[in-house]
Image: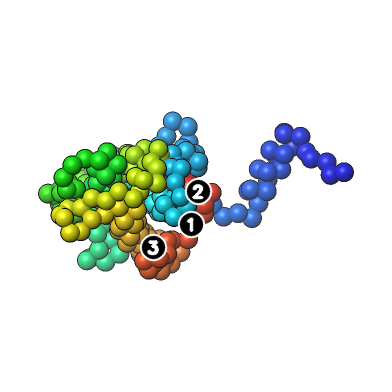
Amino acid sequence: MKKFPNKQQQGSQGSNQANSGKKRFKGKNKFRGKGGFFKRRRFDNMPKVDREYLDVFKQFRRIQATIIRYVSPSSEEQLLWKYSSNFLSIKELMGQLIYNTENRSAHIAHIIQDQNGHLPVFELSEQVKSEEFAERSLEILMSRFISAKRSIENLLKDSKNEDWQKTAGFDDQNTYTIGAILQELIEHDEKCLDAIFLNLQRHQVWYKPVEVPDETTTPETNDNSTDDA
């Protein structure tokens, strides 16, 4: 009969196995740990909906958690790095990410809450938002981004299939579902993430090269770390 180790032995063995031969992302992440922004919530806030909707939701969480994982260890100097003169800095990219995520959160709330009228239109452009956040600290940027991300999670955690089938639009012709809104957000985030990678890689050669994903792919990430946010 196979003998199983007791809890103490099992924990020790598991820890040794996890640490042996496993490369981990290096860099102090002030947004991890107890009391921080980055907590383990793998199964929290998961909507009980059909697989096609759940997959889009998981993809949204994965791409935004990857952004957090790579940006949060950065120094203030690294946040200003640019791959080339025509690139946005990481700070400016975070401004766009925050602006876009907050807008999409408002659109999703509009649909779920069955608000009358068209989807809200925001006057500020991404360029204006990126310039505004270029002067903010890393802590403010990450706090604002994570808050917008969790706003969407909280809106969708109790959603039903019927909510994902509702539509709303900016006019009577072009309408969106929650899935379509999230998909546009994912595609925007992927482009920003690629630019963040390139900005970091330009100055730190140890960053692995990143291929720009097409519309159907997402960056390869470690599920154990990217689903934590």
- Residue kind at label 1, given as amino acid type: Thr
Image-based side of 87 in relation to 213, left or right: left
- Residue at point 18%, 42% (across, down): 116
- Secondary structure of the residue carrying tag 3 is helix
Q: Position of residue 53 (x, y in %)?
A: 41, 52
Instruction: Examine the rendered structure and indicate whether residue 1 appears above or below residue 219.
Output: above
Picture residue at 72% right of the left edge, 34% below the top:
7
Q: Residue furthest left?
A: 123
Q: Which residue is mark 2?
A: 225
Residue 106, position in %: x, y? 24, 43
Q: Which mark sits nearer the N-terminus, 3 or 1? A: 3
Q: Which element carries disc 1, helix, strand or loop?
A: loop
Q: Tell me the distance, in whole angstroms, between the alpha carbons under discs 3 and 1.
A: 17 Å
**Which mark is drawn over residue 201?**
3
Q: Which residue is mark 1?
A: 221
On the image, which quarter does residue 172 sit in?
bottom left
72 or 228: nearer the eye? 228
Q: Is residue 189 visible?
A: no
Q: CA distance from mark 2 to mark 3?
A: 21 Å
Earlier in the chain: of badge 2 and badge 3, it is: 3
Is the C terminus in the top left, top right, bottom left or bottom right quadrant?
top left
The quarter of the image holding the N terminus is top right
Going by the numbered disc 2, the residue's amino acid type is: Ser
Q: State whether residue 174 appears in this view.
A: yes
Q: Position of residue 134 (x, y in %)?
A: 21, 49
Image quadrant assignment for residue 47: top left
- Secondary structure under the numbered disc 2 in the rendered image: helix
Camera-nearest residue between 152 and 168: 168
Asked whether disc 1 touches disc 2, contact meaning CB atoms under 8 Å apart, the reply is: yes
